[in-house]
Image (cartoon, rainbow, N blue to C red):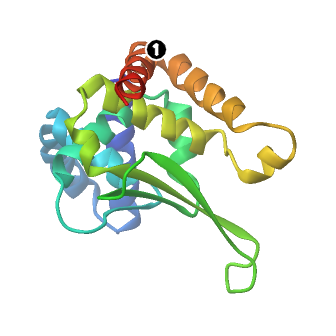
Amino acid sequence: MKDWVRPYIMDQLRKTWIEGGYKNDDIEKISELKAKEISYDESVFCYLTEELNCEFWMGGIGGDYQLFTEIFGSVLADLPQNVFEKISTMKNVFYIFTPQPGAEVKILRFEHDIMAGETIKIVNFPYTDLFNPLRVLRGEIAHEIAHIYAEHDFVQLMNGKTHEDQEDEADQLAMEWGFKDEIKELREFEKELYEEK
């Protein structure tokens, strides 16, 4: 977990309490309690996941949503602060944990309604990924977050950037953020799966 994480959480909470009209004495008391709560990594991971300005939800029935949320949050806690701050304020991003196979970013465009011209990005993580080794799953999450951070889009594909270019760029970003071993294990894991088929 990066050093910025716990101070960031406390700053965000204080802003919320100040905006909510809490008095300074009350804020100090609440801060003490919250500091104890976020001394546990699991609390930090869940809080960071909730802090994303997006929808994060479970589709369908099944899967260990709480476990996935904690693993997802552990990746967020290992991101550089500027990366987390960018993805946490991006609009129209939906992170979902579903029975649907294949971790990927899906792009939806709406041209003829209230969100005319806007793009919605859905980041899908399948239930079955929880059976993968932890570092593989963390690599997969970091890779998909890198797609969001880099704002990969079909428009880029039409402008000469191939799907492989985007995949390589997402891997490179994730490795620069500190997930080098996880990306390496993810690619080895995928290679072994492909060779088995």
Q: Residue at the spot x=34%, y=42% of the render?
A: 9
Provide residue 38's location: percent of width, then percent of height: 19, 39
The amino acid type of the residue labelled 1 equals: Lys
Who is closer to the viewer here, 22 or 84? 84
- Residue with the most extreme right position: 159
* Vertical side of 191 occupied by 14: above or below: below
- Residue with the most extreme bottom position: 113
Provide residue 184's location: percent of width, then percent of height: 44, 15
Q: Is residue 88 left or right of residue 48?
A: right
* Vertical side of 18 occupied by 79: above or below: above
Q: Residue at the spot x=73%, y=52% of the render?
A: 154
Within 10 Å of the Cα at label 1, are there few (<14), some (14-19), or many (20+) other Cα atoms? Answer: some
Q: Which residue is mark 1?
A: 180
Who is closer to the viewer here, 126 or 2? 126
Who is closer to the viewer here, 72 or 18? 72
Provide residue 61's location: percent of width, then percent of height: 19, 67
Is residue 45 among what the camera can see? no
| Residue 96 location, quadrant | bottom left
Numbered disc 1: secondary structure: helix
| Residue 65 location, quadrant | bottom left
- Residue with the most extreme front position: 197
Q: Residue at the spot x=40%, y=22% of the render?
A: 195
Q: Residue at the spot x=59%, y=40% of the render?
A: 147
Q: Is residue 164 left or right of residue 197?
A: right
Provide residue 25's location: percent of width, then percent of height: 21, 54
